[in-house]
Amino acid sequence: MKPPPENRRTARRLRARMRLVPGLAAVGALALISSACGADSDPFESGGGETGTVVIGSQQYYSNTLIAEVYAQVLEDAGLTVQRDFEIGQREVYAAELENGNIDVFPEYAGSLLQYFDPESQARTAEEIRDGLEQALPEGLAALRESEATDQNAMVVTAEFAQEHGLTSIGDLADLDDLVVGSTPEFETRPYGPEGLREVYGVEVQLQTIDDSGGPLTVKALEDGDIDVAANIFTASPAIAAEDLVVLEDPESLVPPENVVPIVSEALDADARAALEEVSAALTQEELLELNTRSVDEQAAPEVIAGEWVEEQGLVG
Amino acid sequence: MSYPAEALDLLLDPAVWGGADGLGARTLEHLGYSLLAVGLSAAIALPLGFAVGHFGRGRNVVVASSGVVRALPTLGLLTLVALFTGLGLLAPMVALVVLAVPSVLAGAYAGIESVDPRTVDAARAQGMSRWQVLTTVQIPLGLPLIVGGIRLATLQVVGTAILAAYVGAGGLGAPLFLGLRTYDYPLLLAASAVVILLALVLDLAFEIAQRLLRRLPGLR
Protein backbone atom coordinates (compact mmCIF):
# COMPACT_ATOMS: atom_id res chain seq x y z
CA MET A 1 0.00 0.00 0.00
CA LYS A 2 1.13 3.51 -0.78
CA PRO A 3 1.04 6.13 1.96
CA PRO A 4 -2.17 8.14 1.84
CA PRO A 5 -1.79 10.36 -1.22
CA GLU A 6 -3.76 13.18 0.44
CA ASN A 7 -1.00 13.84 2.91
CA ARG A 8 1.73 13.86 0.35
CA ARG A 9 -0.36 15.98 -1.93
CA THR A 10 -1.21 18.51 0.74
CA ALA A 11 2.42 18.71 1.71
CA ARG A 12 3.43 19.25 -1.87
CA ARG A 13 0.80 21.88 -2.41
CA LEU A 14 1.84 23.66 0.74
CA ARG A 15 5.38 23.66 -0.55
CA ALA A 16 4.13 25.04 -3.85
CA ARG A 17 2.41 27.84 -1.95
CA MET A 18 5.50 28.51 0.13
CA ARG A 19 7.48 29.11 -3.00
CA LEU A 20 5.29 32.11 -3.54
CA VAL A 21 6.37 33.75 -0.30
CA PRO A 22 9.94 34.63 -1.27
CA GLY A 23 8.47 35.66 -4.61
CA LEU A 24 6.12 38.14 -2.96
CA ALA A 25 8.90 39.40 -0.73
CA ALA A 26 10.96 39.95 -3.85
CA VAL A 27 8.12 41.94 -5.42
CA GLY A 28 7.98 44.14 -2.36
CA ALA A 29 11.73 44.60 -2.28
CA LEU A 30 11.79 45.37 -5.97
CA ALA A 31 9.06 47.94 -5.57
CA LEU A 32 11.22 49.67 -2.97
CA ILE A 33 14.41 49.69 -4.94
CA SER A 34 13.12 49.77 -8.47
CA SER A 35 13.89 53.45 -8.77
CA ALA A 36 17.49 52.74 -7.86
CA CYS A 37 18.22 49.99 -10.30
CA GLY A 38 16.64 48.48 -13.38
CA ALA A 39 14.38 45.74 -12.00
CA ASP A 40 14.49 43.07 -14.63
CA SER A 41 14.52 39.94 -12.52
CA ASP A 42 11.28 37.97 -12.46
CA PRO A 43 10.26 36.95 -8.97
CA PHE A 44 8.31 34.01 -10.36
CA GLU A 45 11.22 32.68 -12.32
CA SER A 46 11.45 29.34 -10.65
CA GLY A 47 10.49 27.20 -13.62
CA GLY A 48 13.32 26.40 -15.96
CA GLY A 49 16.90 27.35 -15.42
CA GLU A 50 19.38 24.75 -14.25
CA THR A 51 19.00 25.61 -10.60
CA GLY A 52 15.20 25.96 -10.27
CA THR A 53 12.60 23.28 -9.71
CA VAL A 54 10.00 22.66 -12.37
CA VAL A 55 6.55 21.97 -10.97
CA ILE A 56 4.44 19.66 -13.12
CA GLY A 57 0.72 19.38 -12.50
CA SER A 58 -1.93 16.97 -13.73
CA GLN A 59 -5.69 16.64 -13.71
CA GLN A 60 -7.49 14.12 -11.56
CA TYR A 61 -7.65 11.78 -14.52
CA TYR A 62 -5.39 8.78 -14.87
CA SER A 63 -4.49 9.40 -18.50
CA ASN A 64 -3.54 13.02 -17.80
CA THR A 65 -1.36 11.98 -14.89
CA LEU A 66 0.33 9.42 -17.10
CA ILE A 67 1.22 12.11 -19.65
CA ALA A 68 2.41 14.40 -16.85
CA GLU A 69 4.64 11.59 -15.60
CA VAL A 70 6.09 11.22 -19.10
CA TYR A 71 6.83 14.97 -19.11
CA ALA A 72 8.42 14.65 -15.68
CA GLN A 73 10.75 11.83 -16.68
CA VAL A 74 11.78 13.53 -19.89
CA LEU A 75 12.55 16.78 -18.05
CA GLU A 76 14.48 14.93 -15.37
CA ASP A 77 16.49 13.31 -18.11
CA ALA A 78 17.23 16.80 -19.42
CA GLY A 79 18.83 17.55 -16.07
CA LEU A 80 16.02 19.48 -14.39
CA THR A 81 14.73 19.00 -10.88
CA VAL A 82 11.06 18.14 -11.10
CA GLN A 83 8.36 18.43 -8.51
CA ARG A 84 5.25 16.36 -9.23
CA ASP A 85 2.04 18.08 -8.20
CA PHE A 86 -0.35 15.54 -9.68
CA GLU A 87 -4.10 14.89 -9.51
CA ILE A 88 -5.24 18.45 -8.85
CA GLY A 89 -8.97 18.16 -9.54
CA GLN A 90 -10.34 19.70 -12.70
CA ARG A 91 -9.53 22.83 -14.67
CA GLU A 92 -11.61 25.12 -12.46
CA VAL A 93 -9.31 24.21 -9.59
CA TYR A 94 -5.85 24.27 -11.10
CA ALA A 95 -6.16 27.03 -13.72
CA ALA A 96 -5.52 29.71 -11.11
CA GLU A 97 -2.38 27.91 -9.94
CA LEU A 98 -1.12 27.83 -13.53
CA GLU A 99 -1.90 31.50 -14.06
CA ASN A 100 -0.09 32.69 -10.96
CA GLY A 101 2.96 30.62 -11.73
CA ASN A 102 2.73 27.95 -9.05
CA ILE A 103 2.75 25.25 -11.73
CA ASP A 104 5.20 25.39 -14.62
CA VAL A 105 4.12 22.50 -16.84
CA PHE A 106 0.69 20.97 -17.39
CA PRO A 107 -0.54 18.50 -20.00
CA GLU A 108 -3.69 20.06 -21.36
CA TYR A 109 -6.42 19.48 -23.93
CA ALA A 110 -6.48 22.20 -26.56
CA GLY A 111 -10.19 22.58 -27.32
CA SER A 112 -11.59 22.79 -23.83
CA LEU A 113 -8.62 24.82 -22.57
CA LEU A 114 -9.41 27.42 -25.24
CA GLN A 115 -13.07 27.32 -24.22
CA TYR A 116 -11.99 27.93 -20.65
CA PHE A 117 -9.88 31.01 -21.37
CA ASP A 118 -12.07 32.29 -24.22
CA PRO A 119 -15.66 31.10 -23.86
CA GLU A 120 -16.67 33.13 -26.93
CA SER A 121 -14.19 31.38 -29.21
CA GLN A 122 -15.63 30.04 -32.45
CA ALA A 123 -12.54 28.01 -33.28
CA ARG A 124 -13.38 24.60 -34.70
CA THR A 125 -10.39 23.02 -36.39
CA ALA A 126 -7.12 22.09 -34.71
CA GLU A 127 -5.35 25.00 -36.45
CA GLU A 128 -7.96 27.55 -35.40
CA ILE A 129 -7.72 26.27 -31.86
CA ARG A 130 -3.95 26.56 -31.82
CA ASP A 131 -4.17 30.16 -33.03
CA GLY A 132 -6.95 30.89 -30.56
CA LEU A 133 -4.91 29.46 -27.70
CA GLU A 134 -1.95 31.70 -28.50
CA GLN A 135 -4.25 34.70 -28.22
CA ALA A 136 -6.23 33.53 -25.23
CA LEU A 137 -3.56 32.17 -22.91
CA PRO A 138 -2.88 34.51 -20.00
CA GLU A 139 0.41 36.33 -19.70
CA GLY A 140 3.24 34.09 -18.63
CA LEU A 141 1.88 30.89 -20.18
CA ALA A 142 2.70 29.34 -23.52
CA ALA A 143 1.32 26.42 -25.50
CA LEU A 144 4.01 24.20 -26.99
CA ARG A 145 3.57 22.07 -30.09
CA GLU A 146 0.52 19.86 -29.59
CA SER A 147 0.56 16.15 -30.15
CA GLU A 148 -1.51 14.40 -32.77
CA ALA A 149 -3.30 12.43 -30.08
CA THR A 150 -6.69 13.68 -28.96
CA ASP A 151 -8.73 12.78 -25.93
CA GLN A 152 -12.23 14.06 -26.50
CA ASN A 153 -15.88 13.23 -26.65
CA ALA A 154 -16.68 11.28 -29.77
CA MET A 155 -19.65 9.54 -31.31
CA VAL A 156 -18.94 5.88 -30.75
CA VAL A 157 -20.89 2.85 -31.98
CA THR A 158 -20.28 -0.87 -31.84
CA ALA A 159 -18.43 -2.35 -34.82
CA GLU A 160 -21.49 -4.50 -35.47
CA PHE A 161 -23.82 -1.49 -35.59
CA ALA A 162 -21.40 0.38 -37.85
CA GLN A 163 -21.22 -2.53 -40.26
CA GLU A 164 -24.95 -3.16 -40.26
CA HIS A 165 -25.71 0.46 -41.24
CA GLY A 166 -22.53 1.23 -43.18
CA LEU A 167 -21.36 3.96 -40.81
CA THR A 168 -17.99 5.66 -40.97
CA SER A 169 -18.82 9.28 -40.24
CA ILE A 170 -21.32 11.04 -37.98
CA GLY A 171 -23.20 12.25 -41.08
CA ASP A 172 -24.07 8.64 -41.95
CA LEU A 173 -26.31 8.55 -38.90
CA ALA A 174 -28.73 10.96 -40.61
CA ASP A 175 -30.41 8.07 -42.45
CA LEU A 176 -31.32 6.27 -39.24
CA ASP A 177 -34.53 6.83 -37.29
CA ASP A 178 -35.10 6.74 -33.53
CA LEU A 179 -31.44 7.08 -32.66
CA VAL A 180 -30.72 6.99 -28.95
CA VAL A 181 -27.52 8.67 -27.81
CA GLY A 182 -26.14 7.83 -24.39
CA SER A 183 -24.16 10.47 -22.55
CA THR A 184 -23.82 12.43 -19.36
CA PRO A 185 -26.69 14.86 -18.74
CA GLU A 186 -24.69 17.94 -19.76
CA PHE A 187 -24.60 16.62 -23.33
CA GLU A 188 -28.02 18.23 -23.79
CA THR A 189 -26.48 21.68 -23.25
CA ARG A 190 -23.23 21.20 -25.18
CA PRO A 191 -22.65 22.80 -28.61
CA TYR A 192 -22.07 19.27 -29.93
CA GLY A 193 -25.26 18.02 -28.24
CA PRO A 194 -28.53 17.09 -29.94
CA GLU A 195 -28.91 20.58 -31.40
CA GLY A 196 -25.42 20.63 -32.87
CA LEU A 197 -25.92 17.17 -34.34
CA ARG A 198 -29.10 18.34 -36.03
CA GLU A 199 -27.63 21.58 -37.37
CA VAL A 200 -24.26 20.29 -38.54
CA TYR A 201 -25.07 16.76 -39.66
CA GLY A 202 -28.86 16.62 -39.85
CA VAL A 203 -28.91 13.81 -37.29
CA GLU A 204 -31.94 13.57 -34.99
CA VAL A 205 -31.23 11.94 -31.65
CA GLN A 206 -32.79 11.32 -28.30
CA LEU A 207 -30.66 11.50 -25.18
CA GLN A 208 -30.46 8.68 -22.67
CA THR A 209 -28.47 9.92 -19.71
CA ILE A 210 -25.81 7.68 -18.19
CA ASP A 211 -23.63 9.28 -15.60
CA ASP A 212 -20.57 7.06 -15.51
CA SER A 213 -18.50 9.17 -17.94
CA GLY A 214 -18.16 6.55 -20.62
CA GLY A 215 -17.35 3.79 -18.17
CA PRO A 216 -18.51 0.18 -18.14
CA LEU A 217 -22.21 1.09 -17.84
CA THR A 218 -22.06 3.07 -21.08
CA VAL A 219 -20.25 0.26 -22.86
CA LYS A 220 -22.82 -2.25 -21.62
CA ALA A 221 -25.69 -0.02 -22.74
CA LEU A 222 -24.12 0.09 -26.23
CA GLU A 223 -23.75 -3.66 -26.37
CA ASP A 224 -27.26 -4.25 -25.04
CA GLY A 225 -28.65 -1.87 -27.63
CA ASP A 226 -30.13 0.36 -24.93
CA ILE A 227 -28.32 3.13 -26.73
CA ASP A 228 -27.19 3.22 -30.37
CA VAL A 229 -24.45 5.80 -30.04
CA ALA A 230 -22.32 6.71 -27.04
CA ALA A 231 -21.28 10.35 -26.91
CA ASN A 232 -19.26 10.14 -23.71
CA ILE A 233 -16.61 7.58 -24.54
CA PHE A 234 -13.39 9.46 -25.12
CA THR A 235 -11.18 8.97 -28.16
CA ALA A 236 -8.33 7.82 -25.93
CA SER A 237 -10.44 5.31 -24.00
CA PRO A 238 -9.05 1.78 -23.81
CA ALA A 239 -12.65 0.57 -24.15
CA ILE A 240 -12.58 1.40 -27.87
CA ALA A 241 -10.09 -1.31 -28.70
CA ALA A 242 -11.11 -3.69 -25.94
CA GLU A 243 -14.82 -3.73 -26.78
CA ASP A 244 -14.48 -3.45 -30.54
CA LEU A 245 -16.03 -0.01 -30.83
CA VAL A 246 -15.86 2.39 -33.73
CA VAL A 247 -15.27 6.14 -33.41
CA LEU A 248 -17.32 7.88 -36.09
CA GLU A 249 -15.38 10.45 -38.07
CA ASP A 250 -16.22 14.08 -37.50
CA PRO A 251 -15.26 15.88 -40.75
CA GLU A 252 -17.07 19.09 -39.73
CA SER A 253 -15.29 19.25 -36.34
CA LEU A 254 -18.57 19.24 -34.44
CA VAL A 255 -16.64 18.27 -31.33
CA PRO A 256 -13.70 20.69 -31.00
CA PRO A 257 -10.43 18.72 -31.24
CA GLU A 258 -8.81 18.10 -27.87
CA ASN A 259 -5.20 17.57 -28.87
CA VAL A 260 -2.89 16.91 -25.97
CA VAL A 261 -0.77 20.04 -25.60
CA PRO A 262 1.92 20.95 -23.06
CA ILE A 263 1.13 24.25 -21.40
CA VAL A 264 4.27 25.75 -19.91
CA SER A 265 5.40 28.79 -18.05
CA GLU A 266 7.17 31.39 -20.23
CA ALA A 267 10.17 30.97 -17.93
CA LEU A 268 10.79 27.37 -18.96
CA ASP A 269 14.06 27.18 -20.87
CA ALA A 270 14.53 26.17 -24.48
CA ASP A 271 16.00 22.72 -23.82
CA ALA A 272 13.08 21.75 -21.63
CA ARG A 273 10.64 22.99 -24.23
CA ALA A 274 12.38 21.02 -26.94
CA ALA A 275 12.19 17.90 -24.78
CA LEU A 276 8.44 18.34 -24.26
CA GLU A 277 7.87 18.95 -27.97
CA GLU A 278 9.67 15.69 -28.69
CA VAL A 279 7.13 13.98 -26.45
CA SER A 280 4.32 15.63 -28.41
CA ALA A 281 5.81 14.35 -31.65
CA ALA A 282 6.04 10.80 -30.31
CA LEU A 283 2.57 10.78 -28.76
CA THR A 284 0.33 9.59 -31.59
CA GLN A 285 -3.24 8.50 -31.05
CA GLU A 286 -2.12 4.84 -31.07
CA GLU A 287 0.58 5.53 -28.51
CA LEU A 288 -1.80 7.37 -26.18
CA LEU A 289 -4.32 4.53 -26.47
CA GLU A 290 -1.52 2.07 -25.73
CA LEU A 291 -0.48 4.02 -22.63
CA ASN A 292 -4.06 4.24 -21.36
CA THR A 293 -4.76 0.60 -22.11
CA ARG A 294 -1.70 -0.48 -20.17
CA SER A 295 -2.72 1.72 -17.28
CA VAL A 296 -6.22 0.22 -17.15
CA ASP A 297 -5.31 -3.38 -17.90
CA GLU A 298 -2.15 -3.78 -15.86
CA GLN A 299 -3.01 -1.28 -13.15
CA ALA A 300 0.70 -0.50 -13.08
CA ALA A 301 1.91 2.73 -11.49
CA PRO A 302 2.22 5.71 -13.87
CA GLU A 303 5.96 5.90 -13.18
CA VAL A 304 6.43 2.37 -14.45
CA ILE A 305 4.32 2.73 -17.57
CA ALA A 306 5.73 6.16 -18.41
CA GLY A 307 9.28 4.95 -17.71
CA GLU A 308 9.01 2.03 -20.12
CA TRP A 309 7.37 4.18 -22.75
CA VAL A 310 9.99 6.94 -22.77
CA GLU A 311 12.68 4.24 -23.08
CA GLU A 312 10.87 2.60 -25.97
CA GLN A 313 10.44 5.90 -27.75
CA GLY A 314 14.05 6.87 -27.20
CA LEU A 315 13.02 10.03 -25.39
CA VAL A 316 15.54 9.57 -22.59
CA GLY A 317 19.17 8.49 -22.36
CA MET B 1 -27.55 37.70 -7.66
CA SER B 2 -26.46 34.97 -5.29
CA TYR B 3 -26.91 31.28 -6.08
CA PRO B 4 -29.59 30.69 -3.43
CA ALA B 5 -31.59 33.66 -4.69
CA GLU B 6 -31.30 32.43 -8.26
CA ALA B 7 -32.30 28.94 -7.14
CA LEU B 8 -35.37 30.40 -5.44
CA ASP B 9 -36.25 32.27 -8.63
CA LEU B 10 -35.95 29.01 -10.51
CA LEU B 11 -38.24 27.26 -8.05
CA LEU B 12 -40.85 30.00 -8.37
CA ASP B 13 -40.85 29.83 -12.16
CA PRO B 14 -43.82 27.71 -13.31
CA ALA B 15 -42.05 26.88 -16.60
CA VAL B 16 -39.37 24.98 -14.68
CA TRP B 17 -41.99 22.70 -13.17
CA GLY B 18 -43.92 21.80 -16.32
CA GLY B 19 -43.14 19.35 -19.10
CA ALA B 20 -41.89 15.79 -19.22
CA ASP B 21 -38.43 16.88 -18.00
CA GLY B 22 -39.76 19.52 -15.63
CA LEU B 23 -39.19 19.55 -11.91
CA GLY B 24 -42.81 18.50 -11.31
CA ALA B 25 -42.48 15.30 -13.31
CA ARG B 26 -39.05 14.63 -11.78
CA THR B 27 -40.41 15.14 -8.27
CA LEU B 28 -43.25 12.68 -8.89
CA GLU B 29 -40.77 10.16 -10.30
CA HIS B 30 -38.54 10.66 -7.29
CA LEU B 31 -41.43 10.23 -4.87
CA GLY B 32 -42.65 7.17 -6.74
CA TYR B 33 -39.23 5.49 -6.71
CA SER B 34 -38.78 6.27 -3.02
CA LEU B 35 -42.17 4.88 -2.03
CA LEU B 36 -41.68 1.79 -4.19
CA ALA B 37 -38.26 1.15 -2.65
CA VAL B 38 -39.55 1.59 0.90
CA GLY B 39 -42.59 -0.55 0.11
CA LEU B 40 -40.45 -3.36 -1.27
CA SER B 41 -38.05 -3.24 1.65
CA ALA B 42 -40.98 -3.28 4.09
CA ALA B 43 -42.36 -6.34 2.32
CA ILE B 44 -39.00 -8.06 2.78
CA ALA B 45 -37.87 -6.77 6.15
CA LEU B 46 -41.09 -6.55 8.19
CA PRO B 47 -41.96 -10.28 8.14
CA LEU B 48 -38.33 -11.14 8.78
CA GLY B 49 -38.04 -8.64 11.62
CA PHE B 50 -41.34 -9.80 13.18
CA ALA B 51 -40.17 -13.41 13.06
CA VAL B 52 -36.83 -12.55 14.65
CA GLY B 53 -38.48 -10.41 17.33
CA HIS B 54 -41.20 -12.93 18.07
CA PHE B 55 -39.10 -16.07 18.24
CA GLY B 56 -36.07 -14.32 19.66
CA ARG B 57 -33.86 -16.38 17.40
CA GLY B 58 -31.41 -15.47 14.69
CA ARG B 59 -31.06 -12.01 16.11
CA ASN B 60 -27.27 -12.07 15.95
CA VAL B 61 -27.28 -13.25 12.36
CA VAL B 62 -29.72 -10.53 11.33
CA VAL B 63 -27.90 -7.79 13.21
CA ALA B 64 -24.54 -8.82 11.78
CA SER B 65 -25.72 -9.21 8.23
CA SER B 66 -27.71 -6.00 8.17
CA GLY B 67 -24.65 -4.25 9.57
CA VAL B 68 -22.60 -5.57 6.67
CA VAL B 69 -25.26 -4.50 4.19
CA ARG B 70 -25.34 -1.02 5.70
CA ALA B 71 -21.64 -0.66 4.98
CA LEU B 72 -22.15 -1.22 1.24
CA PRO B 73 -21.65 2.00 -0.71
CA THR B 74 -24.89 2.50 -2.58
CA LEU B 75 -23.29 3.96 -5.70
CA GLY B 76 -20.91 1.02 -5.97
CA LEU B 77 -23.73 -1.45 -5.55
CA LEU B 78 -25.82 0.40 -8.12
CA THR B 79 -23.02 0.28 -10.68
CA LEU B 80 -22.37 -3.37 -9.98
CA VAL B 81 -26.02 -4.35 -10.38
CA ALA B 82 -26.39 -2.18 -13.48
CA LEU B 83 -23.53 -4.07 -15.11
CA PHE B 84 -25.83 -7.10 -15.07
CA THR B 85 -29.22 -5.50 -15.55
CA GLY B 86 -28.33 -2.65 -17.89
CA LEU B 87 -29.98 0.75 -17.81
CA GLY B 88 -33.31 1.42 -16.22
CA LEU B 89 -34.99 1.31 -12.87
CA LEU B 90 -34.04 -2.19 -11.74
CA ALA B 91 -30.47 -1.45 -10.63
CA PRO B 92 -31.28 1.68 -8.58
CA MET B 93 -34.27 -0.12 -7.06
CA VAL B 94 -32.09 -3.01 -5.89
CA ALA B 95 -29.59 -0.55 -4.43
CA LEU B 96 -32.29 1.47 -2.66
CA VAL B 97 -33.99 -1.62 -1.23
CA VAL B 98 -30.65 -2.85 0.08
CA LEU B 99 -30.17 0.57 1.63
CA ALA B 100 -33.60 0.59 3.27
CA VAL B 101 -33.87 -3.00 4.52
CA PRO B 102 -31.53 -2.74 7.54
CA SER B 103 -33.43 0.20 9.03
CA VAL B 104 -36.85 -1.37 8.54
CA LEU B 105 -35.55 -4.67 9.87
CA ALA B 106 -34.02 -3.10 12.97
CA GLY B 107 -37.25 -1.22 13.69
CA ALA B 108 -39.31 -4.36 13.23
CA TYR B 109 -37.43 -6.67 15.58
CA ALA B 110 -36.74 -3.94 18.10
CA GLY B 111 -40.45 -3.05 18.10
CA ILE B 112 -41.48 -6.62 18.80
CA GLU B 113 -38.79 -7.05 21.44
CA SER B 114 -39.79 -3.82 23.17
CA VAL B 115 -43.08 -5.31 24.29
CA ASP B 116 -43.00 -6.25 27.97
CA PRO B 117 -42.52 -10.06 28.21
CA ARG B 118 -45.13 -10.15 30.99
CA THR B 119 -47.71 -8.74 28.60
CA VAL B 120 -46.82 -11.44 26.08
CA ASP B 121 -47.01 -14.11 28.79
CA ALA B 122 -50.40 -12.81 29.88
CA ALA B 123 -51.67 -13.00 26.31
CA ARG B 124 -50.40 -16.56 25.99
CA ALA B 125 -52.04 -17.45 29.32
CA GLN B 126 -55.33 -16.28 27.97
CA GLY B 127 -55.03 -18.94 25.31
CA MET B 128 -53.97 -16.79 22.39
CA SER B 129 -52.11 -18.54 19.58
CA ARG B 130 -48.63 -17.38 18.60
CA TRP B 131 -50.14 -15.67 15.54
CA GLN B 132 -52.68 -13.85 17.71
CA VAL B 133 -49.99 -12.76 20.15
CA LEU B 134 -47.93 -11.39 17.30
CA THR B 135 -50.73 -9.63 15.42
CA THR B 136 -52.88 -8.37 18.29
CA VAL B 137 -50.30 -7.75 21.01
CA GLN B 138 -46.73 -7.47 19.81
CA ILE B 139 -47.16 -5.61 16.53
CA PRO B 140 -49.64 -3.03 17.85
CA LEU B 141 -47.58 -2.38 20.97
CA GLY B 142 -44.32 -2.26 19.03
CA LEU B 143 -45.79 -0.02 16.35
CA PRO B 144 -43.99 3.20 17.33
CA LEU B 145 -40.59 1.56 16.85
CA ILE B 146 -41.70 -0.32 13.75
CA VAL B 147 -42.97 2.86 12.11
CA GLY B 148 -39.82 4.61 13.30
CA GLY B 149 -37.72 2.13 11.32
CA ILE B 150 -39.76 2.74 8.18
CA ARG B 151 -39.49 6.47 8.76
CA LEU B 152 -35.72 6.30 8.95
CA ALA B 153 -35.55 4.13 5.84
CA THR B 154 -37.77 6.58 3.95
CA LEU B 155 -35.48 9.48 4.77
CA GLN B 156 -32.42 7.56 3.62
CA VAL B 157 -34.11 6.47 0.42
CA VAL B 158 -35.45 9.91 -0.53
CA GLY B 159 -31.96 11.35 -0.19
CA THR B 160 -30.27 8.54 -2.07
CA ALA B 161 -32.83 8.14 -4.86
CA ILE B 162 -30.98 10.85 -6.79
CA LEU B 163 -28.69 8.00 -7.84
CA ALA B 164 -31.42 6.68 -10.14
CA ALA B 165 -30.32 9.37 -12.58
CA TYR B 166 -26.87 7.82 -12.67
CA VAL B 167 -28.23 5.07 -14.89
CA GLY B 168 -30.66 7.32 -16.70
CA ALA B 169 -33.77 6.43 -14.72
CA GLY B 170 -34.67 10.04 -13.91
CA GLY B 171 -35.92 11.37 -10.61
CA LEU B 172 -34.62 14.55 -9.02
CA GLY B 173 -31.09 13.33 -9.60
CA ALA B 174 -31.46 14.28 -13.27
CA PRO B 175 -31.60 18.07 -12.75
CA LEU B 176 -29.19 17.74 -9.83
CA PHE B 177 -26.47 15.98 -11.83
CA LEU B 178 -27.09 18.28 -14.79
CA GLY B 179 -26.52 21.30 -12.57
CA LEU B 180 -23.43 19.71 -11.09
CA ARG B 181 -21.89 18.88 -14.46
CA THR B 182 -22.62 22.18 -16.17
CA TYR B 183 -21.70 24.34 -13.17
CA ASP B 184 -25.32 25.49 -13.14
CA TYR B 185 -25.35 25.93 -9.38
CA PRO B 186 -28.81 27.49 -9.14
CA LEU B 187 -30.27 24.40 -10.82
CA LEU B 188 -28.21 22.16 -8.53
CA LEU B 189 -29.43 24.04 -5.48
CA ALA B 190 -33.03 24.09 -6.66
CA ALA B 191 -33.07 20.34 -7.26
CA SER B 192 -31.40 19.72 -3.89
CA ALA B 193 -33.95 21.97 -2.20
CA VAL B 194 -36.80 19.93 -3.67
CA VAL B 195 -35.16 16.71 -2.41
CA ILE B 196 -34.82 18.23 1.04
CA LEU B 197 -38.37 19.51 0.99
CA LEU B 198 -39.64 16.10 -0.08
CA ALA B 199 -37.74 14.50 2.79
CA LEU B 200 -39.13 17.01 5.28
CA VAL B 201 -42.70 16.56 4.06
CA LEU B 202 -42.45 12.78 4.27
CA ASP B 203 -40.89 13.00 7.71
CA LEU B 204 -43.69 15.30 8.84
CA ALA B 205 -46.23 12.83 7.48
CA PHE B 206 -44.62 10.09 9.55
CA GLU B 207 -44.59 12.34 12.61
CA ILE B 208 -48.31 12.96 12.25
CA ALA B 209 -48.98 9.27 11.62
CA GLN B 210 -47.03 8.31 14.71
CA ARG B 211 -48.94 10.83 16.82
CA LEU B 212 -52.26 9.58 15.51
CA LEU B 213 -51.19 6.02 16.25
CA ARG B 214 -50.48 6.95 19.82
CA ARG B 215 -54.02 8.27 20.18
CA LEU B 216 -55.57 4.98 19.13
CA PRO B 217 -57.18 3.26 22.10
CA GLY B 218 -54.95 0.65 23.67
CA LEU B 219 -51.79 1.92 21.97
CA ARG B 220 -50.20 3.87 24.73
Image (cartoon, rainbow, N blue to C red):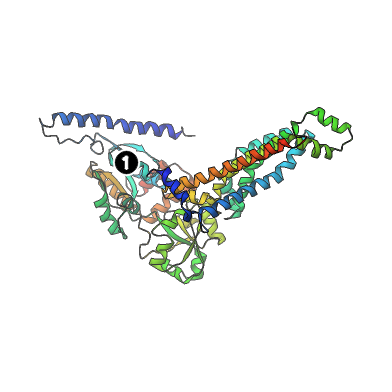
* x and y, in percent, of residue B72 in the image: 60, 40
Mark 1 chain = A
- Count of marks overlaid on the render: 1
Q: Looking at this view, is A277 or A15 the one in front?
A: A15
Q: Amino acid at mark 1?
A: Ala
Q: Looking at this view, is A238 or A4 the one in front?
A: A4
* Residue at the farthest bottom position: A175
Q: Tell me what residue is drawn at x 38 percent, y 66 percent.
A: A200
Q: Is residue B168 visible?
A: no
**Pointer 1 residue:** A96
* Residue at the farthest left position: A36
Quadrant hosting residue A171: bottom left
* x and y, in percent, of residue B170 in the image: 54, 53
Q: Quadrant of the C terminus of chain A?
A: top left
Local packing at callout 1 (Cα closer than 10 Å; few below 14, some 14-19, many 20+) is few
Q: Is residue B85 left or right of residue B126?
A: left
Q: Looking at this view, is B124 or A126 the one in front?
A: B124
> Which structural element holds mark 1?
helix
Q: Tell me what residue is drawn at x 68 percent, y 37 percent.
A: B210
Q: Is residue A133 left or right of residue A169?
A: left
Q: Is residue A200 above or below residue B25?
A: below
* x and y, in percent, of residue A95 in the image: 33, 43
* x and y, in percent, of residue A209 in the image: 50, 55
Q: Is residue A185 visible?
A: yes
Q: Is residue B208 above or below residue A290?
A: above
Q: Is residue A196 left or right of residue A81?
A: right
Q: Tell me what residue is drawn at x 84 percent, y 39 percent.
A: B132
Q: Tell me what residue is drawn at x 74 percent, y 37 percent.
A: B216
